[in-house]
């Protein structure tokens, strides 16, 4: 456990506060309709290149999503091909512009592993429809809890959005990682709100 006070982060590294949230039962009302012109489609065992492109557009350019981009093609393929990992694409005119990923590999719970929208799908009500679809799909199985985590690398609207959606914060961590822009995992100009310190 970190002691109170300031803690130095070395050059080439970045740090985030991670908040873990959970939900033990679905909220009473799940009625957000998918906005006109948008559809949600399950993508079974998606191609890793397709997935990486969507992952980058949804979270890697603006919000420093990088975890899946650091996996090898073999590692990523193994996750995406697992029958207990469900990937959904929110599509506009046949192009994926949103990502919902549910991980049921723990029999007692489901992790809402990733949820986000590329710029083309934002500010249209799709986020509410997407998370409600995820909650409904998760609790269609006999799970004890649905959990998610977000961090200060993500959009500042993410944490309050999850709380409004019925998730309860349960713990926090500090994560220190090598800056993914410096090794080419994501573009050098990604997430400009997080300064690079070499």
Image (cartoon, helix red, strand yellow):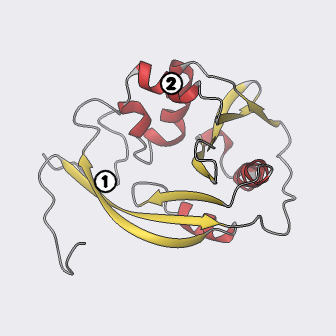
Q: Is residue 68 above or below residue 113?
A: above
What residue sits right under mark 1 in the picture?
A: 194
Q: Could you say where residue 63 lies in the image, as x and y percent from the top left? A: 44, 48
Q: Secondary structure at mark 2?
A: helix
Quarter that holds the C terminus: top left
Q: Is residue 25 above or below residue 64?
A: below
Residue 190, picture quadrant: top left
Q: Nearer the viewer, mark 2 or mark 1?
A: 2
Q: Could you say where residue 15 lies in the image, as x and y percent from the top left? A: 27, 58
How many marks the image carries: the answer is 2
Would you call the spot at circle 1 few (<14 residues within 10 Å), some (14-19), or many (20 or more)?
Answer: some
Q: Secondary structure at mark 1?
A: loop
Would you call the spot at circle 2 few (<14 residues within 10 Å), some (14-19), or many (20 or more)?
Answer: few
Quarter that holds the N terminus: bottom left
**Furthest residue in direction front, as rendered:** 107
Relative placement, left or right, of 181 versus 138 is: left
First in sequence: mark 2 or mark 1? 2
Q: Could you say where residue 7 lies in the image, as x and y percent from the top left? A: 16, 69
Numbered mark located on residue 78 in the image: 2
Residue at left 43%, top 43%?
65
The answer, for residue 136, to whether it is visible in the render is yes
Residue at left 57%, top 28%?
80
Q: Is residue 135 above or below residue 92?
A: below
Residue at left 56%, top 21%?
50
Q: Could you say where residue 182 lies in the image, as x and y percent from the top left? A: 22, 36
């Amino acid at each position: 456990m970190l002691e109170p006070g300031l803690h130095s982060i070395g050059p080439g590294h970045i740090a985030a506060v991670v908040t873990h949230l959970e939900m033990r039962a679905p909220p009473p009302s799940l009625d957000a309709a998918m906005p006109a012109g948008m559809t949600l489609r399950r993508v079974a065992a998606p191609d890793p290149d397709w997935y990486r492109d969507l992952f980058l557009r949804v979270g890697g350019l603006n919000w420093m999503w990088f975890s899946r981009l650091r996996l090898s093609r073999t590692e990523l393929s193994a996750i995406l091909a697992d029958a207990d990992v469900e990937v959904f694409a929110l599509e506009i005119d046949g192009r994926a512009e949103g990502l919902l990923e549910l991980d049921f590999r723990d029999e007692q719970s489901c992790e809402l592993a990733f949820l986000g929208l590329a710029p083309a799908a934002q500010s249209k009500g799709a986020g509410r429809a997407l998370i409600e679809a995820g909650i409904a799909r998760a609790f269609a199985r006999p799970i004890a809890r649905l959990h998610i985590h977000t961090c200060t690398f993500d959009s500042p609207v993410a944490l309050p959005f999850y709380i409004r959606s019925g998730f309860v914060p349960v713990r926090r961590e500090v994560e220190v990682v090598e800056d993914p822009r410096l090794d080419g995992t994501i573009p050098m100009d990604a997430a400009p709100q997080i300064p690079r310190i070499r």
